[in-house]
Image (tube, rainbow, N blue to C red):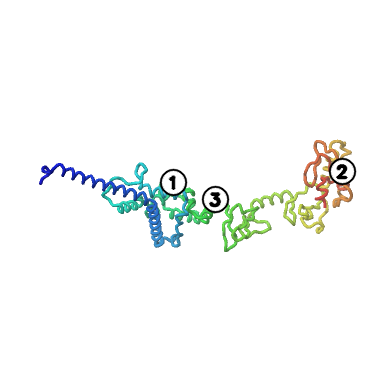
């Protein structure tokens, strides 16, 4: 029987069967779409497990390589410890192919039509992220886009290789700063993948390699670099072993003068040509302008200005007439200014000079004389150099002028 002989009721029945098959296919398609929507979180979890398996495979390949730098590689950080921004980026890359152009869950018509089963669609979805492999320019391994880092020269490194470059550069000055094709690689690109110790080592290397006059611990079994922040007046303290190093000669720290200190040697040469002396106790430089040869240092040490020996332990004269006369002039001009006539001034200078000769070791007995009204020039304390306008105290025998504080706390 051909189609032309089919009765109208039979034609209607065939149309009904076709429509029923269409409805069944439509129901199946809706069921598949609902299943994909429901199983989305599970699929994402499977992606994470699969990603970890890929990372483990790459790690095993590296361990089996002959690269000496990878003989003892560090275990990759757990997924939960990744930088939050990196985790979000990774999730979006993994799941972007589960959505259509309008943001709805599903697949392209040519891939997710009724002719494909749901397991096949899942298999296709799991394969998608790995189709986006990027190849590391160093190890030549393939990685997901979210597991590689693009450096300024547009080359691509995996996280492991870029970390290795930064860690090696912290120990090798020829590789510092890390660069690719002569372009420096910023620390910020890899800092979130470095642990605290690695980050500290790199930052210490930055300080070490940028320091011109480097100082390393003089202890034989230490040798650690000592940053400028640990150096004070030529004395460098090692934070590792606690020992001290001289920054000039690079040997163990010593209290005596360092022959390698250029500034000190220049100062000593100037002192020698100017006739300055050094305190035998604290090694401070002292210049005698006026007065006797009896010097009392700020550290309380007393010594002879001519030979530098302890006071009264040498046969040098106790005063030099030139210095004594200059001190007498200073006292007269201070006390009388321009009020005296030349002859009276000279007589007064001779009188003060004799007083100083007799009292060059004055112990300042009795009460000091209070002199008031310092005028516009004010008084100047000869010990602390401070100026005072109200009054000053003066010894009646040696004519020294001191302020109230020095009279109480400095005069010995």
Secondary structure beneath label 3: helix
Q: Which comes before the other along the chain, label 1 or label 2?
A: 1
Asked whether residue 403 is in view, the answer is yes
Select label 3 or label 2 by which is in front.
2
75 sits to left or right of 118: right
Q: Residue 19, located in which quarter of the rendered image?
A: top left
Measured Cα–Cα span from mark 3 to mark 1: 23 Å
Q: Which comes before the other along the chain, label 3 or label 1?
A: 1
Residue depicted at x 19% and y 43%? 15
Residue depicted at x 41% and y 46%? 154
Secondary structure beneath label 1: loop
Labelled disc at residue 210: 3
Q: Residue 105, image x and y in percent? A: 35, 46
Q: Residue 68, located in which quarter of the rendered image?
A: bottom left
Considering depth in this image, is 371 or 282 the residue closer to the camera?
Answer: 371
Q: Residue 44, image x and y in percent? A: 39, 52
95 sits to left or right of 272: left
Q: Residue furthest bottom?
A: 221
155 sits to left or right of 320: left
Q: Is residue 300 above or below residue 109?
A: below
Asked whether residue 354 is in view, the answer is no
Labelled disc at residue 370: 2
- Mark 2 crowd level (few <14, some 14–19, many ≥20, 10 Å Cα): few
Secondary structure beneath label 2: strand
161 sits to left or right of 223: left
Q: Which comes before the other along the chain, label 3 or label 2?
A: 3
- Mark 1 crowd level (few <14, some 14–19, many ≥20, 10 Å Cα): some
Labelled disc at residue 152: 1
Measured Cα–Cα span from mark 3 to mark 2: 60 Å
- Mark 3 crowd level (few <14, some 14–19, many ≥20, 10 Å Cα): few
């Amino acid at each position: 029987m051909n189609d032309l002989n089919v009765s109208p009721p039979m034609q209607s029945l065939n149309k009904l069967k076709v429509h029923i098959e269409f409805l069944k296919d439509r129901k199946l398609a809706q069921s598949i779409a609902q299943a994909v929507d429901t199983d989305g979180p599970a699929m994402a979890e499977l992606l994470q497990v699969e990603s970890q398996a890929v990372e483990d495979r790459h790690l095993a390949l590296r361990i089996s390589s002959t690269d000496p730098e990878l003989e003892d590689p560090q275990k990759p950080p757990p997924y939960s410890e990744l930088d939050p921004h990196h985790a979000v980026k990774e999730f979006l890359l993994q799941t972007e192919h589960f959505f259509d152009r309008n943001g709805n869950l599903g697949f392209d018509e040519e891939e997710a039509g009724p002719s494909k089963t749901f397991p096949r669609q899942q298999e296709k979805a799991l394969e998608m992220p790995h189709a986006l492999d990027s190849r590391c320019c160093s190890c030549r391994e393939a990685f997901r886009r979210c597991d590689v880092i693009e450096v300024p020269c547009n080359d691509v490194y995996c996280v492991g290789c870029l970390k290795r470059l930064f860690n090696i550069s912290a120990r090798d000055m020829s590789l510092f700063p890390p660069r690719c094709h002569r372009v420096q690689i910023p620390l910020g690109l890899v800092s979130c993948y470095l642990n605290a110790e690695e980050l500290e080592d790199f930052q210490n290397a930055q300080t070490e390699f940028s320091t011109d006059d480097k100082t390393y611990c003089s202890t034989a079994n230490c040798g650690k670099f000592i940053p400028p922040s640990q150096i004070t007046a030529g004395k460098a303290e090692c934070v590792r072993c606690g020992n001290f190093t001289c920054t000039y000669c690079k040997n163990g720290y010593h209290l005596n003068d360092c022959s390698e200190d250029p500034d000190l040697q220049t100062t000593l040469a100037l002192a020698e040509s100017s006739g300055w002396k050094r305190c035998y106790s604290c090694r401070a430089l002292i210049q005698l302008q006026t007065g006797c040869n009896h010097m009392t240092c700020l550290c309380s040490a007393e010594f002879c200005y001519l030979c530098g020996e302890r006071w009264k332990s040498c046969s040098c004269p106790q005063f030099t007439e030139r210095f004594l006369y200059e001190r007498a002039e200073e006292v007269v001009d201070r006390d009388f200014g321009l009020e005296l006539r030349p002859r009276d001034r000279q007589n007064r200078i001779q009188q003060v000079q004799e007083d100083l000769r007799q009292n060059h070791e004055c112990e300042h007995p009795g009460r000091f004389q209070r002199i008031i009204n310092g005028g516009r020039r004010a008084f100047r304390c000869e010990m602390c150099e401070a100026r005072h306008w109200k009054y000053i105290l003066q010894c009646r025998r040696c004519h020294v002028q001191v302020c109230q504080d020095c009279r109480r706390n400095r005069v010995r």
